Amino acid sequence: MALAVGIDLGTTNTVIAAVRNGVAATIPGPQGRRLIPSIVSFLPSGARLVGPAGTERRLMDPANTIYSVKRLIGRAWESPEVQQARPKLPFELREGPKGGTVIAARGETFSLPEISAFILGHAKAVAEAHVGEPVGRAVITVPANFNDLQRAATKTAGRIAGLEVLRILNEPTAAALAYGPQDKAHERIAVYDLGGGTFDVTLLDLAGNVFEVLATAGDTALGGDDVDLIVAERMADDLLAKHRFDARAEPTAFGKLRILAEHVKRELSTQEEHVVSVDDIVPGLGGTRVAWQFRMTRSDLEWAALTLIERTFKVCGHALEAAGCEPAELDRIILVGGATRMPMVARKVEQFFGRAPVVRINPDEVVALGAAIQAALLDKTKQRAGMVEHPRIAEESVVEPLPATDEARPPSEPPPGLPVVSKKDPRPPSPRPPPVAQVVARAPFLSPRPTKPLVFEIPETRAVLPRTTQLGAAVARGGAPSQRPAPPPLPSGPPRRSPPSGPPPLLSFEAPPALAPSAPRPAPLLIDVTPLSLGVETVGGFCDRLIDANTPVPCDRTRTFTTASSGQTTVTVRVAQGESKRFEENTFLGEVELSGLTPAPRGETKIAVTFVIDPDGILDVKARDDSTGREQTARLQLVGAQTSPAEVEEMRARHAAHPIGESAGVLPARRPIAGEA
Amino acid sequence: MATTDALTLFLQSLPKRSYYEILRVPRTAKAREVKSAFHGFSLLYHPDRHVGASDEVVRLAAEIYKRGVEAYACLSRPPLRERYDRALEDGKLRLDASAVAEDLPAPPPPMRTLETIATTPRGKQHALKADRLIAIGKLDDARVQLVSACQCEPYNGELAERLQALYEALALEPL
Ligand SMILES: Nc1ncnc2c1ncn2[C@@H]1O[C@H](COP(=O)(O)OP(=O)(O)O)[C@@H](O)[C@H]1O
Ligand SMILES: [Mg+2]
């Protein structure tokens, strides 16, 4: 039976996870990496390359290396998002069919869902290779404030990749689901997600095992990349001062600086100071290279990034206002997104909410894990067999907040493609105070901690400690904390060292909650909402709201429309999403065409149109002729979307036939491309 | 089969139930009670709770759930709930489709057209043109027509008032 997976299709990174044997785990690629860069590069042969080589390809072949499609997906050609991004992107965007946007590379054009499908297809292949089972169904996550077009396009991408899309799920909801309910009867949670390019904050109510989204807000142009840019600017200043070399005038040099900047930024998440020595940026006399050294301290970085991080709290303010609550009323703040690894983020979050945030699950894996849990919940085959309970999170995704020691931290890899000589700060890093709050909060769920920190062979930078955490139904059977639960079956693949057994716990944990050992908790239920109001255009260019933002989905609303002139046989209704009273200021979704009306005097034909928002947050319409009681054909034509079964099938076939590149520089054997040679 | 029958019966009974009855809360229920009633309702009828059931059961549950959402969307928003309570007094069990939070307070009764306000044939002609121009959002052109209508009927106070309103609307326009 094909496996159901959860996929976090991120702007920067994509992560795939699955629940197997009651354990939710992210699935590593062949080199053990769990983060797939969301980059698709087209080789000279036309074959596509997705995977760790992506970052390098962005430098080597910027015109044919596509990144950040998530910022564009579901956006019409005419939209400000596309028009503003166009001059900044090194690859070519063109106007596509139906007012959509396409990408041109190596003499071919691809719709945006097709590009995303390449990433999804790669993730699927990675999972299939690792698990040794076909992957057929998936829950794919999207930012909570994605509109209908963006959701529909993401769903299409999944289908093109040959996946049955079980659900389009909101990222913050997924994160909350991964953390699971606590024992408190009622709690309010904030999910603070700072990724590569976007920031989102979502407030949820959690009562028992029901998750209800209260409000969500975001900034689509704020993330870790902006921090990289600030650091790269510093580097460029430094180069100018030390070597009179203007990196800003040379795109390749500046591109290298950005990659280097990201590396420095990451290092500064665990070190107080970092020094890089590079010799391939500044050209010297006679083709030689000049060595350049750059030093940055964490506090330099924090000063530089301060305004950026503070912008996130403005957005938090909006969300709180929409939910009608105060920062102090939140019981838990969950950190999501790789950029929350910067220590200043947790500090600032604590200042704003008056409470230490929780980072118990790896912030860049938590969304995929939640999606995998939802996939298991929606998996018909498992539901029938009664196999679903709230899964546990695999131990390798659980973060142990320890004072950082050099032993505990595997050194991070230098960025690919750059000969970097990294030097560690000679001084020992100042120990971070252990963030006790999050440990205590989950204490009843945790197994005892071994005395010595262990390092797993996982290539990403993280301090990992073997630890089994149980959620939901599994908790009930967990037993007393002094009994180490059986380790979860590890995913197959490269063997990992197993934790030593037996040493006494360092911290004494509270007694476990008084749960009847045999009372499993019912599976959790997510009540998600539509993030944007839905409206139709009325005379005078106004927007008549049908469904308010933050209404739970699925939901529907019926509105009656009539003919404006006698004998009219079609009526067209324009639909948009957004909060403005002016129709034009909202995001135009498309038109609903009601056709085949019986000719009648004006105003006599009355058509009841039902707007349905499905559990994926995607709009559908149905219509009925009120005067005759007959079902009407209502065709919903979305801007730039190719969502008809025939169109999707065509793209799926094209996707399946498209050659896959082996690795950077290696030319695949299949299919020569017209226009090449 | 029993489930299908029970769901069908419940679905059929919904048009005869008030929002309070759908969510099974008293008229006096506080926000918190409404919320927890909706959560209970969701546990019963949310389509995700019926994964693996027959398509018919899933469809019925979804139909019921959407009515519950409608009830919750109304009862959980105080201005809408207030308005619904008034509608309920008049025997209306559902809030009409145009009732979303933004419309509040209740919209004024539809305005009389300028054409009906005007009394002279020439005045009516200009007024009708003004009506049409307003309908397509061309307020400035409508103003010209309405000025002409007012010139035909200098004694028509109501027409003058509407002209005043148009001036105000134009001044408020950002353009
Ligand atoms: N250890 C770290 N310290 C600081 N930033 C980090 C660290 N690890 C990853 N990041 C940043 O996180 C961002 C990617 O986050 P992610 O959640 O994967 O993004 P997205 O959701 O946009 O795909 C990048 O800007 C990356 O530089
Ligand atoms: Mg993300």
Image: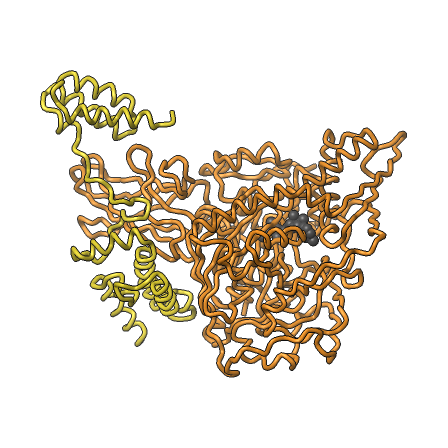
The residue at 54%/61% (across/down) is A332
Residue A110 on image: x %, y %: 56, 42
| Residue B157 in the figure: left or right of residue A471 | left
Chain B rendered in what hue? yellow
| Residue A16 in the figure: left or right of residue A666 | left
Residue B110 on image: x %, y %: 19, 38
Residue A292 lies in quadrant: top right
Q: Determine whether B138 is above or below A309 in the image.
A: above
Q: How is the image coloured?
A: by chain
Quadrant where the image shows the C terminus of chain A: top right
Residue A465 lies in quadrant: bottom right
The residue at 54%/70% (across/down) is A1
Report if residue A660 is visible in the image. no
Residue B65 on image: x %, y %: 34, 62
A110, A416: nearer the viewer: A416
Q: Determine whether A505 is above or below A46 in the image.
A: below
Residue A536 on image: x %, y %: 33, 42
Chain A rendered in what hue? orange
B1, A180: nearer the viewer: A180
Report if residue A480 is visible in the image. yes
B62, A412: nearer the viewer: A412
| Residue A488 in the figure: left or right of residue A252 | left
* Number of numbered tags placed on the structure image: 0
The residue at 20%/23% (across/down) is B129
Residue A587 lies in quadrant: top left
